[in-house]
Image (spheres, grey):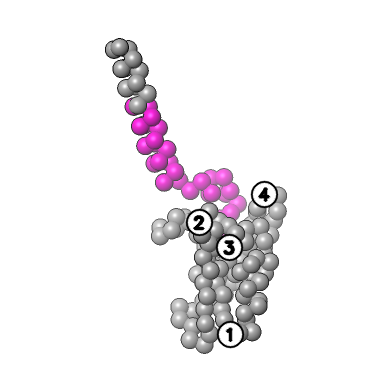
Amino acid sequence: MNKLFRLITLILIILIFDFISTFFLISRLNFNELFNPINKHRIVNDNYHHSFKVNVETIDHWGPYKYKFVTNSLGFKDRSTRKIENVNKSQERIIIIGDSFTEGIGFIYDDTFVGLLDRKLQNYNIEILNAGVASQSP
């Protein structure tokens, strides 16, 4: 009985140590930077874990695919590097938030659903902003 108690205690200590160390590693490391050092435009963000650098124009990778990746002054995926004013009184603004589907990972901005919506609504004086980032919750 004493050996069984020691074994169970040892297993519990190992499990607790494993849980704490895993939690620490996951919460402190940005695995995207470790596994994708080419993607320097994908950065750590203090407010919502990860996002994009502002005003970037680069080539991104998604599996074997390469595509043009552009962000605006807010760090949102966009058609071009452009300055987004904090207040836009001349037109309505819609911000679309989501994960990789919203970001349109693997596609240039114009081929994402946000880009298609942007093109459709530009004649109605509505500005569309894409705040989607892969692995954010929708």
Q: Which residue is found at the position 54% from the left and 58% from the top? A: 99
Per the image, the residue denoted by label 3 is 102
Disc 4 secondary structure class: loop
The quadrant where residue 56 appears = bottom right
Per the image, the residue denoted by label 1 is 125
The image shows a total of numbered marks equal to 4
Disc 2 secondary structure class: loop
User: Badge 1 local density, few (<14 within 10 Å), some, or many (20+)?
Assistant: few
Kind of residue at disc 4: Gly
Per the image, the residue denoted by label 2 is 136
Furthest-bottom residue in this view: 90
The quadrant where residue 25 appears = top left
- Label 2 vs label 4, nearer the camera: 2
Report if the CB atoms under discs 1 and 4 are less than 8 Å apart.
no
Report if the CB atoms under discs 3 and 1 are less than 8 Å apart.
no
* Magenta stretch contains residue 75: no
Kind of residue at disc 2: Gln
Vertical side of 41 occupied by 5: above or below: above
**Nearer to us in this view, 14 or 46:** 14
How far apart in space, not on screen, are marks 2 and 4 (Cα)? Answer: 19 Å
Vertical side of 87 occupied by 17: above or below: above
**Nearer to us in this view, 117 or 109:** 117
The disc, 3 or 1, on the residue closer to the chain's N-terminal end is: 3
User: Badge 2 local density, few (<14 within 10 Å), some, or many (20+)?
Assistant: some
Q: In the picture provided, is 133 more to the left or to the right than 7?
A: right
The disc, 1 or 2, on the residue closer to the chain's N-terminal end is: 1
Q: Position of residue 14 (x, y in %)?
A: 37, 27
How far apart in space, not on screen, are marks 2 and 3 (Cα)? Answer: 10 Å
- Label 4 vs label 3, nearer the camera: 3
Kind of residue at disc 1: Asn
